[in-house]
Image: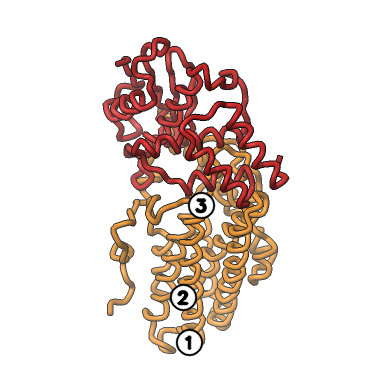
Amino acid sequence: MADIDVVPTEFRNVEFTADQIRGVVARLLVEAGLVDHPGIGSVRIEVDESTPLSKVVTQSLEPLVICAQSGALEDRRRTRHFGGDEAADALGRAVFAAADRLDPTFDGPAFDADVGVAHAVAWDCHVVGRMARLGHRPQRQRRLYSFELRHGFSDATVAAFDRLWSAERLTWAEIVAISDDARSVVGAA
Amino acid sequence: MRKAFPPEDLARDSRFARVDRMDQIADPRAASGQGGGRPNQRLTPDRADSADAARSLMHGIFVGEIQALEGAGRTCWDFETGTDGAPFALKLDMARQCWDEARHCEISVKLSEHMGTEIGEFGESAFLYQAACNPDPVLRLTGVNRALEGLAIDVFNTMKEFGSISADPVLEFCEDWMLADEVTHVKMGSDWLRKLTEDDPERRANALEFQRVVDKLFSFGGFRGEDDESPVILARRFRELAGFGTDEIDEIAAISAEARDEAKAHRASLAAQG
């Protein structure tokens, strides 16, 4: 099992503990097949507790470094408290996307490439669909709404979303094609 | 039945979680500002977090509708018809508003389902209902129908525009229909304020001052305004339709800007304290 470092080790602005975050990430690494990945080495989760926003950025793949704003790990019902489902969702998307990138058959975009909101959301849907089948909170309609916002509201968009959601493993080219096809149907491209 | 029902006793099932507005204000992360320092908070589909931002706002609208229903319902009950300065026709308007707000609750639940939000997924603050607890019916109506329902006009118009630019007909039409009701509710407040204080300029002045206080509180340090920094835009045209004069709308814009500047100064002070 890779070492999981959480920074900071003690929180001042939020009621989180490093162990809570470490526990969530340990499970995700197993589920994403990264636990014994030779390139990962140690895993570092950096939490910015100065802001309630919820952006999560993967800063490096090898070693895996994920930076999360504290709002991403927060219980939406309790200000400043840790939310297990919210953290699994936010960090899970980053961990599973990292696993995709480290899989040569995925043939993902360059690490520093700007993939655009529509393609990023399509990738998210594919990731969260896989996580849902592993027992994480699915929130399928939430993901469908996010997908529709960037691909148009139509039956064709729902069908495209279902392909992303239910597929066990897609390549980056397949994700991009599904996204582009959906956008072209409603003239959103 | 009790009169002047306390906010902490509002009936909710186990799905709902109450949050204390003071906890949110005291959050040390507030030093990063409304929107965490993001320069442009306007809701647009190209914002990476727009789906979740819209879901959160929609849930806020939903619980706001519940509290608006509770507030209008209390106004029907808390005052004696005639003797407390609450004419029967005013109560009839409040009863009609209850009907509207109940329908808005149903619409908001459906919209939340459409956006993938569960009831109670976000915390509920009762501060909207708290503003509906003033013991003077004129002040209550001014605070609720002119200040809070006025804010609802701004919020619904913002959500309607978001539905329009994201080509989401469900959101756009639902918000438009609710917006029409809100204009009526604000107009009721404007009309009753003038009618009930026709011969009492001091009471009118007190009511308008109470409205200013509520307007400022609900500007949330820059939440509502007329520039790109504001997630919710002051809807001038709809406010005119609801009986606001240009000078009154200018005053709300000034109050919102003042609230934003005060919040910025507060954040700077918090940041300086480390």
Q: Which residue is drawn at 38% across and 11% down?
A: A41
| Local SS, label 3 | helix
Image location (x, y in percent) of residue A27: 31, 28
Image location (x, y in percent) of residue B168: 62, 54
Q: Provide the letter of the chain coloured orange.
A: B
Q: Say the numbered circle drawn on residue A137.
A: none
Q: The C terminus of chain B lies in which quarter of the figure?
A: top left
- What kind of residue is marked 3? Met
Q: In this view, does A148 lie to the left or right of A142?
A: right
Q: The N terminus of chain B lies in which quarter of the figure?
A: bottom left
Q: Are marks 1 and 2 in contact (CB under 8 Å)?
A: no
* Residue B147 visible, this orientation: yes
Is the residue A44 above or below the residue B194 in the image?
above
Please identify which colour was used for chain A in the image. red
Foreground of the two, B38 or A31 = A31
Q: Nearer the observer, disc 1 or disc 3?
A: 3
C-alpha separation, residue under disc 1 versus residue under disc 3:
41 Å
The image quadrant of residue B159 is bottom right
| Local SS, label 1 | loop
Image location (x, y in percent) of residue B49: 54, 39
**Residue position for label 1:** B87
Q: Are marks 3 and 2 in contact (CB under 8 Å)?
A: no
**Residue position for label 2:** B98
Q: Both on one chain, marks 1 and 2?
A: yes
Chain bearing mark 1 = B
Q: Which residue is drawn at 55% across and 43% down?
A: A161
Foreground of the two, B82 or B97 = B97
- What kind of residue is marked 1? Pro
Disc with the residue nearer the chain's start (1 vs 2): 1
The image quadrant of residue B195 is bottom right
Q: Say the numbered circle drawn on residue B115.
A: 3
Is the residue B103 above or below the residue A101 in the image?
below
